[in-house]
Image (spheres, grey):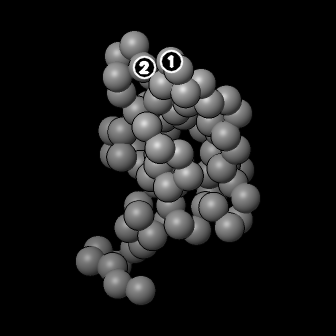
Amino acid sequence: MTTTMGRPSAATKARRLLPEGRLMVKRVDPEKGLIVAQCRGDSGEVYDLGYDPIKKEWRCTCAEMKGNCSHLQALKLVVVV
Ligand SMILES: [Zn+2]
């Protein structure tokens, strides 16, 4: 495992979220391109995340990294847009 900042990168963390069962995909609508999911954070908090086809953007209720947090990266590992 390689890190550049002394803490796991969002990509590394994303890969850990999946086997830990912390990502829950609630709804996928392939026609609209809508994705709704929830992810449990390190201290048990639950974030709502997904893809908004109207604004065409990935969103997560956590305040990390604006659209590229570990939760969204985990979601992108399991869904294809
Ligand atoms: Zn997030």
Q: Earlier in the sequence, mark 1 or mark 2?
A: 1
Residue 12 lies in quadrant? bottom left
Numbered mark located on residue 53 in the image: 2
Instruction: Determine if residue 45 is in view.
Output: no
Residue bearing the label numbered 1: 32
Q: Which corner quadrant holds the C terminus?
A: top left
Q: Report whether the residue tagged 2 is closer than 8 Å to ligand 1.
A: no
State the residue at coordinates (59%, 24%): 29
How packed is label 1: few (under 14 Cα within 10 Å), some, or many (20 or more)?
few
| Direction top: furthest residue | 54
State the residue at coordinates (66%, 50%): 23
| Direction bottom: furthest residue | 1
- SS at mark 1 in the image: loop
**Count of picture labels:** 2
Q: Nearer the viewer, mark 1 or mark 2?
A: 1
- SS at mark 2 in the image: loop
> Callout 1, which amino acid?
Lys
Instruction: Determine if residue 74 is in view.
Output: yes
| Direction left: furthest residue | 4
Numbered mark located on residue 40 in the image: none
- Whether residue 11 sits left or right of residue 61 in the image: it is left
Relative height, residue 2 to residue 35 (above, below): below
State the residue at coordinates (61%, 61%): 17
- Residue 70, percent across and down? 46, 54
Residue 8 lies in quadrant? bottom left
Relative height, residue 33 to residue 81 (above, below): above
How packed is label 2: few (under 14 Cα within 10 Å), some, or many (20 or more)?
few
Looking at the picture, tell me which residue is in the foreground, 78 or 64: 78
Relative height, residue 2 to residue 72 (above, below): below
Relative height, residue 53 to residue 65 (above, below): above
- Residue 59, percent across and down? 44, 31
- Disc 1, disc 2: CB below 8 Å? yes
